[in-house]
Structures are given as C-alpha cells and as structure tokens.
Image (tube, grey):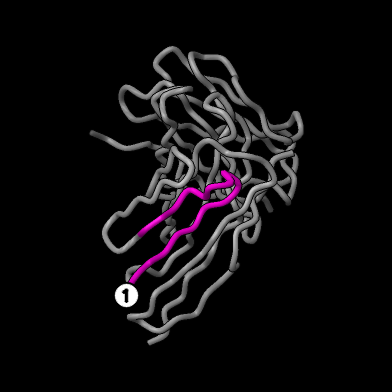
Amino acid sequence: GQQLNQSPQSMFIQEGEDVSMNCTSSSIFNTWLWYKQDPGEGPVLLIALYKAGELTSNGRLTAQFGITRKDSFLNISASIPSDVGIYFCAGQENRDDKIIFGKGTRLHILP
Amino acid sequence: KAGVTQTPRYLIKTRGQQVTLSCSPISGHRSVSWYQQTPGQGLQFLFEYFSETQRNKGNFPGRFSGRQFSNSRSEMNVSTLELGDSALYLCASSLGPGLNEKLFFGSGTQLSVL
C-alpha cells in the first residue's frame, strides 16, 4: 500500500536557524500537502503543491514538489519559538484517493 | 466562517463499551474524513464520506464505522472498545473529491480507554 516516509522524526535547533525536512513516497503523488500541529489542536494546512517541480512559499516557509513526484521538501528559515510543533507531510496519489500522512517531524527550539 | 467542530473534546470509556464521535464540517464542505492519531504513528486514515456515501476506507477493523448525514455532518462509531483504541480522533472536511483537496481539521476528540 501507499507509504510516506518523513524525516527526520525530530529536530532540536537553536532559534534563528534554518530547518529542512522531507518526505518520500513509495508511489507517485499528484498532490503534496504540508501541515503543522500545535499541542491540543488539529493540524493546520501550511502549503499545498499540485505540480511536479512546483516551489511555493508561505512567509518563512518554502515547500517543493519533487520532480520525480515521489518526494517533497519543507524548509523553514530563521526559526522562531512559535515554529515549535509537529510538521506532517501528506500526499494524494490521484484526485479521488484518500490523503495519507507521514508520521511527522517534531520540531524543538532550544532556548 | 466557522471551522470544523468536533464533539466531545474528551472522552473516557472502558473496554468493551462503544463510543460515537461527532463532526460538523465547514459550511459548504461536503466531504468528511476521519483519522486516528497515536504517538509515533502519525495520522492513520479511517474513512472518507461524501454525499452520505463512504468513498474510501483505511485498514481498520469493522469495529470502526461511520456515517454522513444529508447536512454533511458525520459521526464515527467504535464498538467493543479496546485499550489500543486510545487515541486522538481527528475529523477533516474538504470541498469534495477532485477539487484540489485541502483538508481542514477540527481539534479532535481525545479518547481514553481504560
């Protein structure tokens, strides 16, 4: 079945550092989504990608839809304390398919 | 516009009992998906409903079921609860299939099975 491998599982960084995380799939996806979850809340959509090679930014966040259509990357520049949380990638093989999620990257920011 | 509303927020049950969780989607959204979130496992897809019909189903036992009403509100039911069913159950709504799917999540129902 479809699988999403998200890495790293967790990250410990200093405030101000840049962050990179990625997601790879066992099959080709037509849609990639990136979400962030704060404690006690549901995930919130950060960026949606619909075309191979697409590079999209949302403030300090930038995500890319890999050329192979089997991977996606999320970068956060100049991290701040409120960036702490769990980041999930999600993908959809075809427009009618279910959306599946990676296991998440937990971001910690050291004081 | 109100977001996705899930009730109850917290629930404590004992093994063998059954539970029903409720989800009201964003106004105008006709698709509702349910996910189970446990530590270290991410979000596991349970099922998706559109126009009162189940469109997709994940790999969960038959104890997990759901339905959608004509106003797009959805409920999921878990019968004969097991300890391993303890999790955060998230509901997400979207406009519908084939419409550049963007899922919008509720805050979830935290289920604890004792």
Q: Give the labeled residue for mark 1.
A: A78
Identified at 75% across, 40% down, the residue is B16
Is A57 positioned to the left or the right of B21 in the image? Answer: left
- Residue B1, how many percent across, how many down? 23, 33
Please give the name of the residue rendered at 61% of the width and 56% of the height, measured from the top-left corner.
A103
Q: Secondary structure at mark 1?
A: loop
User: As drawn, is A2 to the left or to the right of B52?
Assistant: right
* Mark 1 surroundings: few (<14), some (14-19) or many (≥20) residues within 10 A: some
Residue drawn at (74%, 38%) of the image: A1
Question: Is residue A45 among the parts visible in the rendering?
Answer: no
Q: Magenta stretch: residue A74 in it?
A: yes
- Identify whether A4 is placed above or below B71: below
Quarter occupied by residue A110 = bottom left
- Rendered-image quadrant of the C terminus of chain A: bottom left
Pointer 1 indicates a residue of which chain?
Answer: A
Instruction: State the extent of the magenta-drawn residues as a range.
Output: A62-80
Does the magenta-highlighted stretch encompass residue B60?
A: no
Q: Position of residue B21 (x, y in %)?
A: 53, 34
The foreground one among B101 and B12 is B101
Q: Residue B96: x, y in percent?
A: 44, 22
